[in-house]
């Protein structure tokens, strides 16, 4: 089925497939004898190239296919429209051993029995009555870690923990056909209204933000510091060996104008590669290939050393970034979330950005890594296989490494004459207070070159008898609680406002875009709308949301 041209009946089938996908995978995995799995793994490992050999494009075979739906099974690019989507689907279909299971050994069984993974608590955003709460404010989120981490759970035959499912990251993992921004604007804004596929009484409002694409050849010079965890907890095939293969891919994309340093940390932190030109690939690859795991995890010390190195070789007209690769299990020195966040916040104002790459299972600290990326003007991805590494570090290199707008906030004002109540789907840990929108000291999310951000609101139109139990308050005694007549006379459903700063700026700029009341049937909605809605419902099913 080609999801680029679907009618309502087909959309229902897609929803069913999305809902059954985890169950089908669980059944398939549980019915496969362990010995057969081990034999398959051994065969794959024996046929794989040596770890010291940088993967080439030929290693990642891509035979043309046609289904966008297949992206749900593997890597998907962000930015580049339909062609990029097709390429990502091709790679996903050729991924014969999704997730880290291609490296599986008996140690993974031990990790499962002593699981200490950590995720932040997420409570679904509730419906809010527009008359009492007309403003909805949140920070954008370009992280994609939740989707690939979820894929890892499912392909290993494990139902993901509820709090591991962040719906906005599932939606934003994929690409959409949003228009490129005009003139010198860093991004474009697209809005669309149609029916909610899971509640016929409600509507969905789709907001899409598309970052300006910059071809690799036009990217500015980069001052990159690879901060790699080589502690004892990284001594499994899906951690340090995968890190080494992933960074080999990135090294292949660097040029003479780029500078790379490598900092490692275990019981202590140290520099294993001083600043080196990107053209000296043999030297960089040798440093990566010689890494070995062992010892405790002084993550805080490594972060400090990496940022100090990035600051010392800061490029005023270039891109300065620390790329942290870890399982997040810091246990020596500065290791608490609060201490690490304070340290990161002190460095972010220096113009140094952060990319966090999560690896491994069992002791994976998702909560810690998400916080570090959020507070460090950065982005966060989870690498479960080499194709995901290629997606993040090669295909989406510009978006991963180059920030085009920082502290990006969205505020939506709903018209109470048109909208009875609304609910933001996802972004639970990105919510801001109404007054934070105009406060330039409040941190928010960053947008990379070519990246897109999608937000969905489920709304209950005025006059609709919904099956949702809406919160209510008594009529106010000392102020008018009535809707202004001007709101009834307006044809606007809501006003979308967006604030952002330039990468080196300190003052935000404001964009406003009204959304007119109306909409189209689900049959006539865009393919982007239908696909994002399907992914959102998939996430709600996995979370067992009361709104699914």
Image: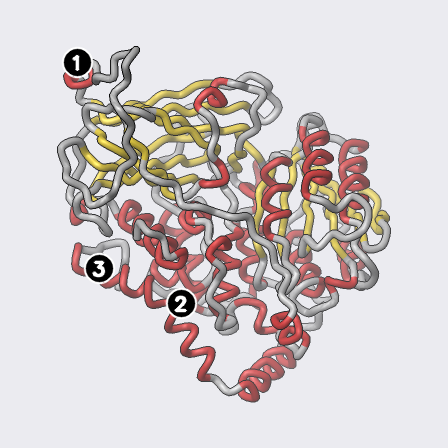
Residue beneath label 1, please?
485
Above or below 534: residue 404? above
Q: Position of residue 327 (x, y in %)?
A: 67, 56
| Residue at x-position 53% and y-position 54% | 391
Element on which disc 2 rests? helix
Q: Earlier in the sequence, mark 1 or mark 3?
A: 3
Give the residue displayed 54% in from the left and 83% down from the top: 37
In this view, the residue in front, 394 or 227, is: 227
Residues under numbered marks 2 and 1 in contact, where contact means CB atoms less than 8 Å apart: no
Is residue 536 visible in the rendered structure shown here? yes
207, 250: nearer the viewer: 207
User: Which numbered dot is residue 22?
Assistant: 2
Mark 2 → mark 3, Cα distance in angstroms? 17 Å
SS category of the residue bearing label 1: helix
Residue at 38% of width from left, 23% of height from top? 497
Q: Is residue 515 toward the left or the right of residue 200 in the image? A: right
Q: Which mark is residue 138?
A: none
User: Which label lies toward us, 1 or 3?
Assistant: 1
User: Where on the picture, by quarter, is residue 371?
Assistant: top right
Observer-nearest of 89 and 544? 544
Q: Earlier in the sequence, mark 2 or mark 1?
A: 2
Residue 95 visible at all: no
Q: Quadrant of the N terminus?
A: bottom left
Q: Is 2 placed above or below 528 here?
A: below
Q: Which residue is mark 3?
A: 12
Q: Mark 2 packing: few (<14 Cα in 10 Å), some, or many (20+)? A: many
Q: At x 43% / y 67%, what residue is drawn? A: 93
Q: Secondary structure at mark 3?
A: helix
- In the picture, measured across the screen, residue 293 lies left or right of residue 357, that is right
């Amino acid at each position: 089925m080609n999801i680029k041209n679907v009618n309502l009946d087909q959309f229902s089938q897609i929803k069913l497939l999305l809902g059954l996908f985890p169950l089908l995978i669980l059944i398939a995995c549980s019915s496969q004898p362990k010995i057969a799995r081990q034999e398959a793994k051994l065969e794959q490992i024996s046929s794989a190239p040596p770890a010291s050999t940088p993967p080439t494009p030929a290693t990642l075979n891509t035979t043309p296919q046609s289904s966008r739906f297949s992206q749900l099974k593997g890597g998907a690019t962000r930015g580049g429209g339909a062609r990029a989507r097709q390429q990502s689907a091709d790679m996903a279909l050729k991924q014969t051993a999704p997730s880290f299971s291609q490296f599986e050994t008996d140690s993974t069984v031990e990790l499962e029995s002593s699981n200490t993974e950590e995720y932040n608590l997420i409570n679904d955003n509730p419906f809010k009555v527009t008359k009492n709460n007309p403003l909805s404010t949140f920070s954008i989120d370009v992280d994609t870690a939740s989707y690939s981490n979820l894929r890892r759970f499912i392909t290993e035959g494990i139902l993901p923990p509820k709090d591991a499912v962040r719906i906005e990251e599932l939606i934003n993992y994929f690409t959409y056909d949003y228009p490129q921004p005009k003139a010198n604007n860093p991004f474009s804004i697209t809005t669309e209204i149609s029916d909610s596929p899971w509640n016929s009484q409600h509507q969905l409002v789709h907001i899409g933000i598309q970052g300006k694409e910059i071809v690799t050849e036009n990217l500015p010079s980069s001052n990159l510091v690879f901060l790699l965890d080589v502690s004892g907890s990284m001594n499994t095939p899906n951690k340090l060996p995968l890190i080494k293969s992933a960074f080999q891919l990135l090294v292949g994309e660097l040029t003479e104008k780029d500078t790379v340093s490598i900092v490692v940390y275990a019981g202590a932190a140290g520099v294993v590669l001083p600043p080196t030109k990107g053209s000296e690939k043999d030297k960089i690859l040798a440093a990566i290939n010689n890494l070995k795991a062992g010892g405790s995890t002084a993550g805080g010390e490594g972060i400090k050393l990496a940022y100090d190195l990035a600051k010392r070789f800061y490029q005023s007209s270039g891109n300065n970034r620390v790329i942290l690769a870890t399982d997040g299990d810091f246990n020596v020195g500065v290791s608490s979330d609060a201490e690490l966040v304070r340290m990161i916040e002190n460095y972010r104002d220096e113009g140094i950005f952060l990319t966090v790459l999560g690896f491994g299972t069992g002791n994976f600290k998702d909560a810690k890594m998400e916080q570090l990326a959020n507070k460090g003007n950065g982005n966060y991805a989870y690498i479960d296989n080499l194709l995901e590494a290629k997606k993040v570090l090669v295909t989406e290199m510009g978006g991963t490494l180059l920030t085009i707008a920082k502290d990006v906030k969205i505020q939506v004002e709903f018209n109470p004459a048109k909208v009875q109540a609304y609910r933001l789907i996802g972004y639970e840990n990105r919510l801001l207070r109404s007054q934070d929108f105009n406060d330039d000291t409040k941190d928010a999310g960053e947008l990379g070159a070519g990246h897109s951000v999608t937000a969905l609101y489920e709304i209950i139109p005025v006059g609709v008898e919904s099956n949702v139990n809406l919160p209510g308050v008594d009529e106010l005694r000392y102020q008018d609680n009535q809707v202004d007549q001007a709101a009834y006379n307006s044809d606007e459903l809501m006003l979308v406002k967006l604030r952002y700063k330039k990468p080196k700026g300190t003052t935000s700029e404001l964009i406003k875009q009204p959304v007119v009341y109306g909409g189209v049937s689900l049959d006539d909605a865009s393919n982007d709308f239908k696909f994002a809605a399907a992914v959102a419902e998939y996430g709600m099913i996995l979370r067992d949301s009361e709104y699914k």
